[in-house]
Amino acid sequence: MTKFIAPFFFLILFACTPNEEESSSLNTFQGVFSSEPPLEADVVFYKDIPYGSGDREKMDLLLPNNKALEGLVVFFHGGSFQFGSKEDLYREELQPILKATLENNIAFASVGYTFITDAQSEGVFTALENGSDAIDFLRKNSAALNIPSNKIILAGVSAGAGIALWNGFSEQTNAEVEGILALYAQSSYDLYQWNSLFEDFDLDSIRNQNSDIETLFTQFYGGEYTSEKGIRLDFSNQMDGNDPPLYLYNPTYEEDVFSGETLNLDVLFHSYKHADFLRAKAIEVGLPISGAYVNFPQDFIRNTLLD
């Protein structure tokens, strides 16, 4: 959930067999003119396409130029639901991977979403539902973009991974999703579930001792926490064997949530314990799962969509 720059091997690909050779070279899409892309690549780039009415409800699209597109990755950035932007995908360390991906005729959508600190926010629910709206928007416009609509990879880092997981495990949004790629993910957004993951971590005690955390807690839930909200946000309990295959990567191996009296947010948000919890749940329900111990992200996506 903290602001995060993805590791160099973070490859969010998407592929499927195109039905016909069609060009993706469109001058405009949804009233947005193509513009100079944010990296050196033969792509058509659309910036700030609105998919909703909110200030941050915009996405960028990168479409390989004059190619029959193989598919689409829908990417959600990280940042604790307070920071970051869809432009995080274009940072220098990711450009070689993006170029290689686009050269394989794989399109990207980089999606912005409402922060919990925004005036129009109803907590993390708004960001998660923004993700649903973005997925629905792309499905409805897949024909105009010449992108196969029946295969989607949902990908994200940290908070963005949570958006991918929440939507990927929901029957309302995962019908055409073929895989979920979650890096530096959390195991649930019912934050009380985290008490059982970390020794000496007690959410209520921290809330009582730190007014800033209490404020963020209230913003996160869009008001007072209730058990009903917790159930809606516990996406791990929505997982079943019919969900899309899952790839997890959480390489934060420190054990201590506290450094002295300071809360270590990287450990709290990105610990391997979150991934282990989700992995155990996937095994329990019979959901295919992999991670860096099996293959690289690009291998997971290729195996999921092309084999």
Image: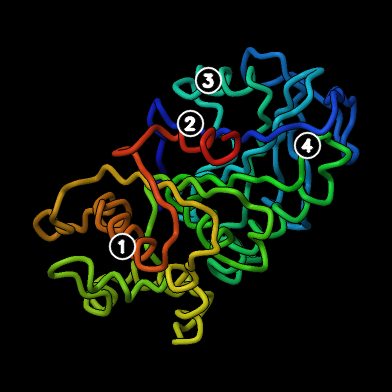
Residue ranking furthest to the front = 307
Depth check: give the residue in front, 137 or 301: 301
Which of disc 1 and disc 2 is earlier in sequence? 1
Determine the CA span between mark 4 and mark 1.
34 Å
Name the residue type under label 3: Gln
Label ID, residue 214: none
Depth check: give the residue in front, 43 or 2: 43
Residue 239 seen anywhere in this rendered image of the structure: yes
Residue hosting label 3: 95
Q: Position of residue 208 (x, y in %)?
A: 26, 79
Which of disc 2 and disc 4 is earlier in sequence? 4
**Mark nearer the viewer, 4 or 3:** 4
**Is residue 105 shown left or right of residue 190?**
right
Q: Residue at x 67, y 35 (%)?
A: 16
Residue hosting label 4: 147
Q: Residue at x 73, y 22 (%)?
A: 64
Residue hosting label 2: 298
Q: Position of residue 30 (x, y in %)?
A: 88, 41
Q: Position of residue 117 (x, y in %)?
A: 53, 61
Dividing the picture into quarters, in which one does residue 258 lie?
Answer: bottom left
Dividing the picture into quarters, in which one does residue 66 lie?
Answer: top right
Q: Alpha-carbon neighbours of circle 4 within 10 Å: few (<14), some, or many (≥20)?
A: many
For mark 2, give the secondary structure: helix
**Mark nearer the viewer, 1 or 3:** 1
Which of disc 1 and disc 4 is earlier in sequence? 4
Residue hosting label 1: 280
Which of disc 3 and disc 4 is earlier in sequence? 3
Identify the image's colour scheme: rainbow, by chain, secondary structure or one colour: rainbow
Q: Alpha-carbon neighbours of circle 3 within 10 Å: few (<14), some, or many (≥20)?
A: some
Q: Position of residue 73 (x, y in %)?
A: 62, 39
Q: Alpha-carbon neighbours of circle 2 within 10 Å: few (<14), some, or many (≥20)?
A: some
